[in-house]
C-alpha cells in the first residue's frame, strides 16, 4: 500500500476515535467542541504520532489515545488563538471560527473543555503492566510541550513581540515553541512508548523539530500569499514577511531535507514520516482569509 | 495540635510547593500565572485533599502534587471566568483581576498555562511501583470533574441559563457541577490513593458533594450582601437571590450538617475535614465588589 493510502486509513481511525470521544454530551458545549475538531483539519499531529508508533513497533490501538489527545490540544489552541482578545479571526479552515458560531464565552470554554479532555484521554490510555513508566513519560512530554515553556510560551512571544523589532533568533524560538513543540511531542510518541535507542530518539526528535519549523514556514508563506490578495491587517510576526518569500521557501526546503536526513541518519524506515515532511513542500495557494494550521 | 494550626501547616506546605512549581520562568506569562495563584486564596481544595489523604493514611508528600494541581485548576478557572467575555470582573480577592493587570490575552494564556501545568504536575506525581493504577484513577477523577461534564459544563449552565427562568433542580445541578465537582474530586484524593472501603469512599464523596454545595451557597450569600451594598449588575443565577437569603442560609447549614453526618456514618475521624466544613457557616461580610471563591 502507498504511504498516502496508509495515512488515509490512519486518519479515518483518528476521526472515528475523536468522534467517539466527543459524542458523550449533546450540550452546546460539546457542540462547540465538535464543531472545532471536525472542521476539516488534516490531523497532521495524530498522523505523525501514529506513523512514529508504527516505526517503533507500537500498535495503533496503543498509540491512538495519544494521537487524539494531541489533536484535541491543537484544536483548543486554535479556538483560543482565534478569539477576539488574541487574533480576532472570523474564519478558520474556510468557515466561521468557533467563537463566531457559538459566541466568545462558549468558545473559550470549549477550548478549556478540549484541553481538559485531552488529559483525561491521556490519563485513561490503556496501558499494560510494566508500561506505566513509559506512559507517564509521554504524558509529561506532551504537557511540557503544550505548556508555558512550550506552545503557550510561544504564543505569548507571538503576541508580545512587535513584528517591526523582531530578531531572527527570537522569531525562530517563537516558531519552535508555538508550532514545533507539539509537533516534536507528536513524533516522540512512538519512541517513548516503544523500544528506541537514544540515537533513534535523538534522530526522530531532530525530524520533529525540523518538521515543526517547516510547518510554520509553510503556514507563513501561505498566509503571506493571502495577505497580498486581501491586504488584511498583519501586525504579528510572520517568517515569510521577515525573511522574504524566496528565503522563506529556501528555509522551508532546508528544514524538510534536514528532517529526512535525520531519519536516514538513524536508519529509521518510515515512508509515511518521509511523506508527511515532503508534503509540506506542496504549498498550493489558499483562498483569501482562510487559515489552515493542519 | 488544633485543627486550625494543622491546617495552617498544610497551607504553608501547599504554598511552598506552588511557589516551586511556578518559579521556573521569569516571563510575563509566569508572572501572570504567579499573580493569579498568589492572590490570597485560602487553598480550600488543597486543604481538603491533604486532610482526606491524612484520614486514609496517605503521606502529605504523596498527596501534595494532587493538592497543588487542584489549586492550579481552580485558579485557571477563576482567571477565565473573570475575563471580559465571561464575567468581566475587575476585582478578584480585593485586587485587580489577572486580565486587568496583564491584559486579556496574557490572562487567557496564563489560564491555559495553569491548566496545562496542573496535568504536568499530576503526570509527574511520584508513585511507587504497584500504585500507578491508583494514580491513574485520581487523575481521571480530577480531569472528569474539571471537564465538560463537570466544572466547565457547570460554567456553561451558569452563563447560558437566564436567572429569571431558573428552576431549582437546574440551579442545584449548576452548583454541583460548577463548584461541587472539583471540591468532591479534592476529597476523593485520600481514599483513591489510600486504602478505602466502598462505604468510606461513598461517605467521603457525600461529604464532598455537600461541602461543595454549601461552599457555593456561602459564596452566593456573601455575593448577595455585596449586591445590596453596591447595587452592581447581577444577571447570572445566584442561589441566595433565587431562594432568598434566609432559605439560602438554612440550606447552607443543612448541607454542612449533611457533610459532617456523612463522615460520622462511616466513622471517618478527621477534625480537619469537620473544621473545613463548619468554617463555611462563618459567613462574615465582605466588602463591595470583592470576589472570593476560596
Image (tube, coloured by chain):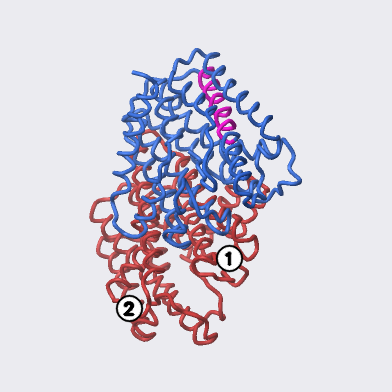
Chain colours: A red, B blue
Q: Residue at x 56, y 50 (%)?
A: A17
Say left or right for A186 vs B146.
left
**Image height check: is B222 above or below A219?**
above
Which chain letter goes with mark 1? A
- Residue A285 visible in the shown view: yes
Earlier sequence position, callout 2 versus callout 1? 1
Which residue lies under the disc numbered 1? A40
Which residue lies under the disc numbered 2? A165
Q: Secondary structure at mark 1?
A: loop
Q: Which residue range is magenta in the image?
A: B198-216
Q: Is residue B201 magenta?
A: yes
Q: Within 10 Å of the Cα at label 1, are there few (<14), some (14-19), or many (20+) other Cα atoms?
A: some
Which chain letter goes with mark 2? A
Quarter of the rendering containing residue A38: bottom right
**Image height check: is A61 above or below B257?**
below
Residue B10, horizontal then vertical, whole percent: 35, 30
Amino acid at each position: 500500500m502507498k504511504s498516502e493510502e496508509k495515512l488515509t486509513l490512519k486518519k479515518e481511525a483518528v476521526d472515528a476515535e475523536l468522534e467517539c470521544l466527543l459524542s458523550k454530551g449533546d450540550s452546546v458545549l460539546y457542540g462547540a467542541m465538535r464543531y472545532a475538531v471536525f472542521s476539516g483539519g488534516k490531523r497532521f499531529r495524530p498522523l505523525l504520532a501514529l506513523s512514529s508508533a508504527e516505526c517503533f513497533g507500537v500498535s495503533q490501538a496503543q498509540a491512538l489515545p495519544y494521537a487524539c489527545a494531541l489533536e484535541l490540544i491543537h484544536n483548543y489552541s486554535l479556538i483560543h488563538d482565534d478569539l477576539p482578545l488574541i487574533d480576532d479571526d472570523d474564519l478558520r479552515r474556510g468557515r466561521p471560527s468557533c467563537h463566531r458560531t457559538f459566541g466568545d464565552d462558549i468558545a473559550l470554554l470549549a477550548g478549556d473543555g478540549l484541553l481538559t479532555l485531552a488529559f483525561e484521554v491521556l490519563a485513561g490510555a490503556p496501558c499494560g503492566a510494566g508500561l506505566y513508566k513509559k506512559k507517564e513519560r509521554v504524558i509529561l512530554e506532551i504537557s511540557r510541550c503544550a505548556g508555558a515553556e512550550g506552545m503557550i510560551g510561544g504564543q505569548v512571544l507571538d503576541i508580545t513581540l512587535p513584528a517591526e523589532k523582531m530578531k531572527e533568533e527570537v522569531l525562530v524560538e517563537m516558531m519552535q515553541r508555538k508550532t514545533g513543540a507539539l509537533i516534536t511531542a507528536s513524533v516522540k510518541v512512538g519512541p517513548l512508548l516503544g523500544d528506541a535507542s537514544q540515537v533513534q530518539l535523538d534522530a526522530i526528535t531532530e525530524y520533529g523539530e525540523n518538521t515543526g519549523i517547516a510547518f510554520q514556514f509553510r503556514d507563513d508563506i501561505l498566509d503571506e500569499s493571502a495577505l497580498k490578495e486581501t491586504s488584511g491587517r498583519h501586525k504579528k510576526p510572520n517568517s515569510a514577511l521577515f525573511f522574504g518569500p524566496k528565503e522563506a521557501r529556501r528555509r522551508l526546503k532546508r528544514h524538510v531535507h534536514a528532517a529526512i536526513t535525520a531519519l536516514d541518519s538513524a536508519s529509521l524506515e518510515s515512508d509515511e514520516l518521509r511523506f508527511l515532511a515532503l508534503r509540506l513542500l506542496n504549498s498550493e495557494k489558499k483562498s483569501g482569509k482562510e487559515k489552515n494550521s493542519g
